[in-house]
Amino acid sequence: DTGVSQNPRHKITKRGQNVTFRCDPISEHNRLYWYRQTLGQGPEFLTYFQNEAQLEKSRLLSDRFSAERPKGSFSTLEIQRTEQGDSAMYLCASSLSQGTSYNSPLHFGNGTRLTVT
Amino acid sequence: AQSVTQLGSHVSVSEGALVLLRCNYSSSVPPYLFWYVQYPNQGLQLLLKYTSAATLVKGINGFEAEFKKSETSFHLTKPSAHMSDAAEYFCAVSAAFGNEKLTFGTGTRLTIIP
């Protein structure tokens, strides 16, 4: 169990640029989640995948945001035309879901801190 | 829909004193409840979880929490604070039978006074 890995740890970008973050979940986990955390707040749900299928997206995920998990393993979160309000910590988490028989807790990565100048 | 309210955005206790962090939940279905800890510039680490088995839940690092349905509470306690407990603590709720869409509280920053 190497844990959830997120890259990069920090990203500074100018307003209007596109950015992409990567998340590598725990290898046997079939669910992957993206959360956003702004200063002084708790994490807010953005979206989640079961294997490669994106099952739910929050209303926080505007059309400038897109997430993929093409082979059911790693995931990417892209933000197009970044705005200063996008500055936040973006957290990835993974879990193992086996229907009603077992669901593991979420395991979080260390996050990617985005600063939009 | 589920939500949690954490009372007190900052709590300070002396080293060796009791730690009490408060969390109240609202849920239209039986909830699963969690406490996570976050150290600076790190992700969240699970401390403990309530999944409708025992109402008193023991977690890592000496923490425990008690589910009280009548009070809709899930407060986190530790008998004796240690300097290494200084961190941000988040209470979270999800619908039973699933871990998707954890809804977090706004967090409580715990400071330990030497």
Image (tube, rainbow, N blue to C red):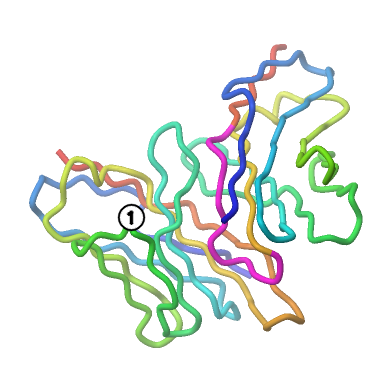
Above or below, A28 relative to A106: below
Relative image position of residue A115 (x, y in whole percent): 24, 42
Say which amino acid is labelled 1: Leu
Look at the image and say whether residue B84 sits in the magenta stretch.
no
Relative image position of residue B36 (x, y in whole percent): 65, 46
Identify the image quadrant of residue A68.
bottom left
Q: Which residue is at a point 72% across and 58% down the rendered structure image?
A: B32
Q: Which residue is at a point 83% across and 46% down the rendered structure image?
A: B69
Above or below, B106 relative to B81: below
What residue would you read off at disc 1?
A: A60
Q: Which residue is at a point 46% across and 36% down the rendered structure image?
A: A41
Q: Quadrant of the N terminus of chain B?
A: bottom right
Image-based side of B87 in relation to A20, left or right = right
Image-based side of A77 in relation to A97, left or right = left
Circle 1 chain: A
Above or below, B18 relative to B76: above
Look at the image and say whether residue B105 sits in the magenta stretch.
yes
Q: Quadrant of the C terminus of chain B?
A: top right
Image-based side of A67 in relation to B48, left or right = left
Q: Which residue is at a point 37% across and 52% down the rendered structure image?
A: A112
Decide which of A94, A57 is in the foreground and name it: A57
Overall secondary structure of the magenta section: loop
Decide which of A73, B91 is in the foreground and name it: B91
Above or below, B46 relative to B37: below
Relative image position of residue A45 (x, y in whole percent): 45, 56
Identify the image quadrant of residue A23.
bottom left
Most distant residue in the front direction:
B28
Most distant residue in the left direction:
A16
Identify the image quadrant of residue A84.
top left
Q: Which residues are magenta?
A: B96-107
Relative image position of residue A58 (x, y in whole percent): 38, 61
